[in-house]
Image: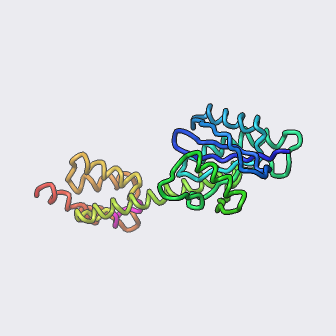
């Protein structure tokens, strides 16, 4: 019984796909196909692999372009492969290879040749394979990483803002608890609109009731007094 493995060389707009029966004793006879990277083409790729009774598929981790391909095969091809009559324990397995482990000789770049090399090196266990969790775990990981990155972006923006104000001798960070809070944003917006009166700027924070404990108007006016001197210079 034939045992077919597919190799996929992933690009931004197209996919070079090869498929061969690896149980033969002679040289592998690869069937080559081009597919697009849009959702409809990925569905057609999944149907073609299922129709050819491909048992395993291996692709290269090219930037972020492999993710839609992996997701489509995981959604369409993998269930069809595993539910097929006579499916084995390895049916529907997807492999993600690190790009460095599939590097060919210099000056011999060819899309189909790269895909064929993926199949050959998978069989000879020369590829470095990456772990890819299931779809639900990937979603949770993406959510966690996104929240962490947004927090880092906020801290970086706050530090840049504080550095800019300190360079202008505006001691806003020593008076407010949050440089990106409501009170601070109101004063920053007033500064951007051209307001230079320290008392008027201080009134924005006082009316918002977000002053730190023991803070008072006499502390705010000197801290914001540089706005007038900068405007006059």
Residue 72 point in image, percent of width and height: 66, 40
Q: Quadrant of the N terminus?
A: top right
Residue 152 point in image, percent of width and height: 47, 60
Residue 176 within the magenta-colored segment of the rendering:
yes
The residue drawn where x is 62% and y is 31% is 40
Residue 174 as seen in the image, left or right of residue 229 = right
User: Measured along the vertical axis of the image, is residue 172 above or below residue 79?
Assistant: below
In the rendered image, which quarter is residue 162 located in?
Answer: bottom left
> Chief secondary structure of the magenta span?
loop
User: Measured along the vertical axis of the image, is residue 106 above or below residue 116?
Assistant: below
Q: Which residues are magenta?
A: 173-178
The residue drawn where x is 68% and y is 55% is 120
The residue drawn where x is 71% and y is 61% is 124
- Taking depth in this image into account, of 130 and 167 the one nearest to the observer is 130
Residue 129 point in image, percent of width and height: 66, 60
Residue 15 as seen in the image, left or right of residue 184 = right
Q: How is the image coloured?
A: rainbow
Residue 188 point in image, percent of width and height: 30, 52
Residue 142 as seen in the image, left or right of residue 174 = right
Residue 139 within the magenta-colored segment of the rendering:
no
- Taking depth in this image into account, of 111 and 63 the one nearest to the observer is 111
């Amino acid at each position: 019984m034939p045992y077919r493995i597919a190799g996929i060389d992933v690009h931004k707009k197209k996919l070079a796909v090869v498929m061969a029966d690896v149980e033969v004793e002679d040289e592998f006879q690869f069937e080559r196909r081009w597919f697009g990277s849009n959702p409809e083409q990925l569905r057609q790729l999944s149907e073609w692999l299922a129709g050819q009774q491909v048992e395993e598929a291996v692709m290269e981790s090219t930037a972020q372009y492999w993710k839609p391909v992996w997701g489509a095969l995981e959604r369409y091809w993998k269930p069809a492969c595993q539910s097929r009559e006579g499916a084995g324990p390895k049916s529907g397995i997807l492999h993600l290879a690190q790009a460095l482990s599939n590097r060919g000789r210099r000056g011999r770049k060819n899309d189909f040749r790269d895909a064929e090399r993926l199949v050959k090196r998978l069989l000879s266990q020369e590829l470095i394979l990456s772990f890819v969790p299931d779809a639900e775990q990937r979603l949770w990981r993406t959510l966690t990483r996104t929240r962490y990155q947004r927090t880092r972006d906020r801290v970086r923006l706050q530090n840049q803002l504080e550095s800019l104000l300190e360079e202008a001798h505006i001691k806003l960070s020593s008076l407010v608890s949050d440089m990106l809070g409501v009170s601070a944003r109101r004063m920053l917006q007033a500064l951007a609109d051209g307001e230079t009166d320290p008392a008027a700027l201080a009134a924005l924070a006082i009316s918002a009731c977000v002053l730190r404990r023991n803070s008072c108007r006499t502390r705010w006016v000197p801290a914001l007094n540089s706005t007038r001197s900068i405007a006059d210079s």
